[in-house]
Image (cartoon, rainbow, N blue to C red):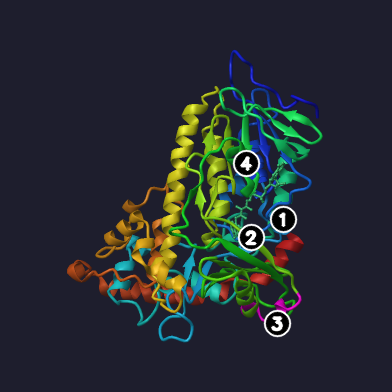
């Protein structure tokens, strides 16, 4: 590849055709594959996409949990589900189990709750939540068990679908866990097959034009590479959007305290051990641990606040959580600052992935935001050179997405009843909760979250997710004043009993998670 070979802007007419993605992690390759599929690349009139990635700077290689939106993204890219699962060592993820987030271990009360990906069952359109709040379900039963069969299925280490069911569809909604390095490799193969040009080289400098836009990127071996539009997927280093263009980073650390992680991969106790089909998220003294089951190993990590513990203690907490399997395993450490760039698109550069923002691993918002940005960029692609208009809309939507996701993440922390450590006390302090979240919680004192509280163009997490976390954290919505309005209690009780029976049927009908995974790996 030679100097200027990526194509350059025509001074008279500035249509956008040549796109240069810098960075080959999950963000770079997912954006490349998605845009390659949707922008008709290499076709007459289509866009041309190149991706440059450094042979010397590795990818982050964590990010093993996803959200169900990934199904649509992969289907749109055109990857068969079985190929994706086999190549990425993917397993099914039906939700997240939160252990000890409400109260510490060994205290009376529920020890965990589940955020399932399946929405609540609404028999004949009936919303059962108010009846659960009014005590019509069995005593002590959580909302996660009362209104879906998914918690029962997940508890039993079963899969969300049967063998032979169509790609990206199943009895129950799901996302995946996978090996992040293998996933990026698969996306690379797919993107290159779709026509993306792959350049292995390191960007040393990013010169700016007189108008402050990016004039090109200077590489070690290929000289200057230029394009009409640059996508910064360089991870935390944010070479283009941060270092060159100085788009500010807005910290959210005042709300989301976690800023470090330590990760370890460990084998199962025995090769045929059940694979949990959900992430196990366990609250710890100054953060939380994740535990993700792949086919051949577990991916574990501890996310924590450096204001509330130190690195040595944090690693020990992770090793104690894992037990003997961690003994001879080396740990990797990560540093980050929860936040985002309110202007991820500046001039001719768009940031996607860690360069645009990152909160923490909770609820897999990292990969979700990559998906959102890829879809948005594809829809708003400035074919006619209309970058300013496209950037304005992209920035507004991404900023609101981040702000609303930050509220959802803080919801997991701020309702805790834990007072055992400074981390949890500080999280429960109302001064560390954003006003926007406090406003939502005020609304829900006397009514549950409704569709009208959310905007699906801006909210990553729907009413269903908010409800499962809100009531999993034992928030008290008081319906006493309107209890008379809920006149169908007997009907609701019948429906709760039917969901219990449905859970028993699902347990009998669905295969063991490990069995289905092995069948998919072997036979597709
Ligand atoms: P990276 O993976 O860092 O890739 C950067 C790329 O840029 C590399 O290819 C590198 O070679 C290239 N590059 C950098 N500089 C240059 C240069 N000068 N020249 C050329 N190339 C360059 N997200 C989730 O959704 N779910 C999770 O469970 C989850 N867990 C996480 C756990 C931790 C501890 C952390 C820190 C993050 C987690 N995330 C998670 C976030 C997720 O890992 C990232 O969103 C995802 O990996 C995307 O990373 P990236 O592609 O933006 O950056």
User: Pointer 2: residues within 10 angstroms few (<14), some, or many (20+)?
Assistant: few
Would residue 386 be visible to someone looking at this image?
yes
Give coordinates of residue 480: x percent, y percent.
20, 71
SS at mark 2 in the image:
strand
SS at mark 4 in the image:
helix
Q: Are marks 2 and 3 in contact (CB under 8 Å)?
A: no
Q: Which mark is residue 181?
A: 1
Give coordinates of residue 141: x percent, y percent.
39, 79
**Among numbered discs 3 and 4, the one appearing first in the sequence:** 4
Which segment is the magenta one?
Answer: 321-328
Drawn side of residue 144 relative to residue 24, left or right? left
In front: mark 3 or mark 4? 3
Q: Calculate the distance from the C-alpha at mark 1 to the C-alpha at mark 4.
A: 18 Å
Q: Are marks 1 and 3 in contact (CB under 8 Å)?
A: no
**Pointer 3 residue:** 324
**Pointer 4 residue:** 34
Residue at 63% across, 58% down: 63
The one nearer the camera, 502 or 120, is: 120
The one nearer the camera, 28 or 133, is: 28
Quadrant in the rendering for residue 348: top right
**Among numbered discs 2 and 4, the one appearing first in the sequence:** 4
């Amino acid at each position: 590849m030679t100097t200027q070979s990526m194509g350059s802007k025509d001074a008279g007419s500035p249509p956008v055709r040549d796109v240069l993605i810098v960075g080959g992690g999950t963000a770079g390759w997912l954006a490349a594959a998605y845009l390659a599929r949707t922008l008709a690349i290499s076709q007459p009139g289509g866009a041309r996409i190149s991706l440059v990635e450094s042979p010397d700077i590795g990818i982050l290689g964590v990010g093993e949990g996803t959200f169900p939106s990934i199904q649509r993204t992969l289907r749109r890219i055109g990857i068969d589900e079985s190929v994706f699962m086999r190549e990425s060592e993917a397993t099914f993820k039906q939700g997240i189990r939160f252990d000890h987030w409400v109260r510490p271990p060994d205290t009376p009360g529920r020890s965990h709750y589940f955020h399932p990906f399946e929405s609540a069952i609404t028999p004949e359109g009936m919303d059962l939540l108010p009846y659960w709040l009014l005590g019509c379900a069995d005593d002590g039963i959580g909302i996660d068990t009362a209104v879906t069969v998914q918690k029962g299925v997940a508890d039993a280490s079963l899969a969300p679908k049967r063998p032979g069911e169509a790609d990206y569809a199943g009895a129950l909604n799901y996302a995946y866990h996978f090996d992040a390095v293998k996933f990026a490799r698969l996306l690379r193969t797919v993107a290159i097959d779709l026509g993306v040009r792959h350049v292995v080289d390191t960007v040393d400098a990013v010169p700016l034009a007189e108008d402050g836009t990016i004039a090109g990127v200077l590489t070690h071996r290929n000289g200057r590479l230029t394009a009409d539009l640059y996508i910064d997927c360089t991870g935390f280093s944010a070479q283009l959007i941060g270092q060159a263009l100085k788009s500010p980073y807005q910290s959210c650390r005042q709300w989301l305290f976690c800023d470090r992680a330590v990760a370890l991969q460990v084998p199962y106790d025995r090769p045929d051990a059940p694979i949990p089909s959900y992430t196990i998220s366990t609250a710890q003294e100054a953060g939380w641990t994740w535990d993700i089951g792949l086919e051949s190993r577990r991916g574990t990590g501890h996310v924590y606040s450096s204001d509330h513990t130190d690195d040595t203690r944090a690693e020990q907490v992770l090793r104690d959580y894992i037990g003997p399997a961690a003994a001879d395993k080396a740990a990797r450490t990560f540093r980050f600052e929860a936040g985002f760039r309110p202007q991820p698109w500046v001039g001719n550069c768009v940031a996607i992935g860690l360069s645009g923002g990152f909160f923490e691993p909770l609820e897999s918002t990292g990969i979700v935001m990559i998906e959102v940005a890829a879809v948005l960029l594809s829809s708003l692609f400035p074919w006619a050179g209309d970058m300013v208009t496209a950037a304005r809309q992209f920035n507004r939507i991404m900023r609101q997405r981040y702000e609303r996701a930050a509220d959802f993440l803080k919801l997991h922390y701020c309702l805790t009843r834990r007072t055992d450590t400074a981390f949890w006390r500080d999280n429960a302090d109302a001064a560390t909760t954003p006003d926007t979240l406090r406003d939502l919680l005020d609304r829900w004192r006397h009514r549950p979250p409704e569709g009208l509280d959310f905007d699906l163009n801006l909210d990553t997490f729907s009413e269903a997710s908010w409800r499962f976390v809100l009531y999993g954290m034992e928030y008290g919505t008081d319906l006493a004043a309107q209890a008379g309005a809920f006149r169908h209690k007997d009907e609701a009780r019948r429906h709760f009993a039917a969901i219990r029976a449905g859970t028993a049927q699902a347990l009998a009908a669905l295969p063991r998670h490990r069995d289905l995974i092995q069948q998919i790996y072997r036979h597709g």
